[in-house]
Image: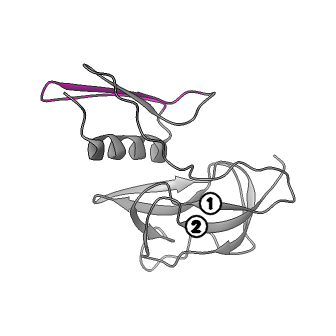
Amino acid sequence: MIPDLKTLDALMARMQALGITELDYSRDGEHIRLVRGEQDSRPQATGTPPAVAAPSLPATETAPASSSAETTIEAPMHGQFYASPAPDAPPFVKPGDIVAEGQPLYILEVMKTLSRIEAEFPCRILAVLAANADAVSPGTPLFTVEPLDA
């Protein structure tokens, strides 16, 4: 049985959003094992039987090239972008803010599940490119940042 691509996409998206490196999923006789490695951060899937290669997801953040280069943080999947933890709360970040690795940047709602997305590297927020409650898709630019030396 070939795994459903929607299921694979949803599982891979959750892995990436939560920073999970390995996931086993079984349902109705279907078994999917996803593993993200150090060398290749893209999840790979194997089904039993047959093995199925998983489509790659765009990175949540592009890796910093140097401390003076600007880079863009993009949406990893389809969902709803929220800049703050609650409607009446201030945004997680605004232009000019210095962000530490692991600091929350935004919330992405996918299939009624809210995931707090954190910075993968220290950076300075140069611009917020998405508006609160915007619908985003994979690769949608969300922030322009300047990576900082750790």
The residue at 48%/43% (across/down) is 16
In terms of sequence position, does the residue under pointer 2 or pointer 1 come before the other? 1
Residue 148, quarter of picture: bottom right
The residue at 76%/50% (across/down) is 64
Image coordinates for residue 11, horizontal then vertical, percent = 35, 41
Verify whether residue 26 appears in magenta. yes
- Above-or-below relation of 138 to 46: below
Residue 73's disc number:
1
Label 2–label 1 contact, CB within 8 A:
yes
Is residue 53 or residue 19 the one in the foreground?
A: 53
Image coordinates for residue 126, horizontal then vertical, percent = 73, 72
The residue at 27%/21% (across/down) is 50
Residue 1 placement, left or right of 92: left
The residue at 70%/53% (across/down) is 100
Residue 136 placement, left or right of 59: left
State the CA–CA distance, disc 2 to disc 1.
6 Å
Which stretch appears magenta?
A: 21-37
Q: Secondary structure at mark 1?
A: strand
Is residue 57 or residue 90 the one in the foreground?
A: 57
Q: Secondary structure at mark 2?
A: strand
Circle 2 residue: 141
Locate the N terminus and report the quarter of the image it occupies.
Answer: top left
Q: Amino acid at mark 1?
A: Ile
